[in-house]
Amino acid sequence: MTVGDAAGLRIRVPDELSARVPAEQRGPGLDRDAVRLLVSHGTEVTHHAFGELPALLRAGDLLVVNTSPTLAAAVDGRIAHARVVVHFSTRGDDGRWAVEVRDPDGRGTTRARAGGPAGTVVCLPGGARLVLEEPLGAFTGAGAGSAAGARLWWARVSPRDVPGLLRGYGRPIRYAYTERDQPLSVYQSVFALDTPDGAGSAEMPSASRPFTARMVTDLVIRGVRFAPVTLHTGVASVEAHEPPYPERFEVPEPSARLINVARAGDGRVIAVGTTAVRAVESAAGMDGVVRGAAGWTDLVVTPERGVRVVDGLLTGLHEPEASHLLMLRAIAGRAALARSYDEALRGLYLWHEFGDLHLLFP
């Protein structure tokens, strides 16, 4: 059974519904909020512009946003005489990095290649190099294994200043459905905050990308509040659609209090992105109370596990094989998810990180 089957989706997304460039590059006078918004309350679906979001929320609602900045995580390298591209994913507690080594495809993007073997040396710009040591399945830093082990490997990098390497030689990770390389600023959200140790996300927490400072101000004026959390996302599994592996997260105590206050009152807790769901649900007890927490999370939200905290989710549109769809089904239910995706296809909504958004409630 595929993820799409498990989530109740039997659809095919045509290539022409892939968003190839950011919204602000599709015409003069457009900003990054020039995307569409599909809203589903159960099986009831309505269509909006994203700019209507403030009118769709109410005073007391709480938006949980991910503040992780996006890294320039793709770096060119060589294995002997062969060109490769290294995607830096996650830094472990022991200083090693989980990386994915990919082949350039001749079109400015990459294609998958077999991981390993152990001992493989990748020469990087500026005299740096990395050595592959073991598959990510041997995940000692987070105390959990991963299905991504054949694709992702722990590597020792020297010199150890990987953030400096990425700043000097990296570029944002992109995939074949996009039209061209973009500057790193295109992949940063209005909520992104620099971290003292240079940590961040290998790929953009894209659900928050359409927010502008103007919209945030409008929401605050209307009584909508924000709770910042952090989850540093690793590289996606665009070919195999594996479930997410362990990632670093933090839910600060002030944000935990805001979430608990909203849940005790009339406000709705709405996660902006699947990363925000994973962070908040990782900090929630069996009683649904959220407490300040930080570390690694290996939580995978499924319909069987359910959600304890979030009342709604603002997210992009996911491919029918994507593991994130199980999280969406946990929040909204199988019938609602199938109905909303049928409407998205019928309405020619755009998929992927530069695409349109979906606000879903049970």
Image (cartoon, grey):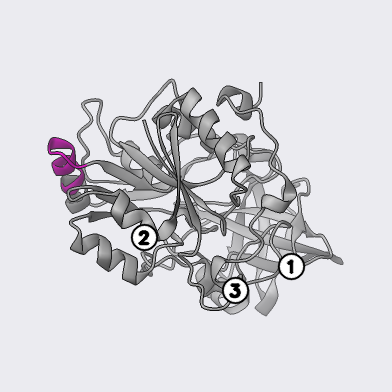
Query: Residue 21's spot in the image, x, y percent?
Result: 63, 66
- Name the side, left or right, on which 358 lies relative to 277: right
Q: Residue 88 at what x, y percent from top left?
A: 59, 59
Q: Magenta region, mostly helix, strand or loop?
A: helix
Q: Are marks 3 and 1 in contact (CB under 8 Å)?
A: no
Which quadrant is the N terminus positioned in? top right
Mark nearer the viewer, 3 or 2: 3
Label 2: state its secondary structure: loop
Using the rendered view, name the quadrant where residue 305 is placed: top left
**Depth check, front residue: 197 or 224:** 224
Q: Give the range drawn in magenta.
A: 258-267
- What is the crowding at mark 1: few (fewer than 14 residues within 10 Å), some, or many (at least 20)? many
Task: Report crowding for label 3: few under 14, some 14 to 19, many 20 or more residues within 10 A (C-alpha).
Answer: few
Q: Which of 170 and 31 is in front in this view?
A: 31
Q: What residue type is labelled 3?
A: Gly
Which residue matches tag 3? Answer: 27
> Which residue is rendered at x = 53% and y = 51% of the image?
234
At which x and y percent is residue 272? Answer: 38, 50
Q: Report if residue 259 lies within the magenta region.
A: yes
Question: Of label 1 and label 2, which has the lower sequence position?
Answer: 2
Name the N-terminal-most of marks 3 and 1: 3
Quick one: SS at disc 3? Answer: loop
Picture quadrant where residue 158 is located: bottom right
Badge 1 is on which residue? 77
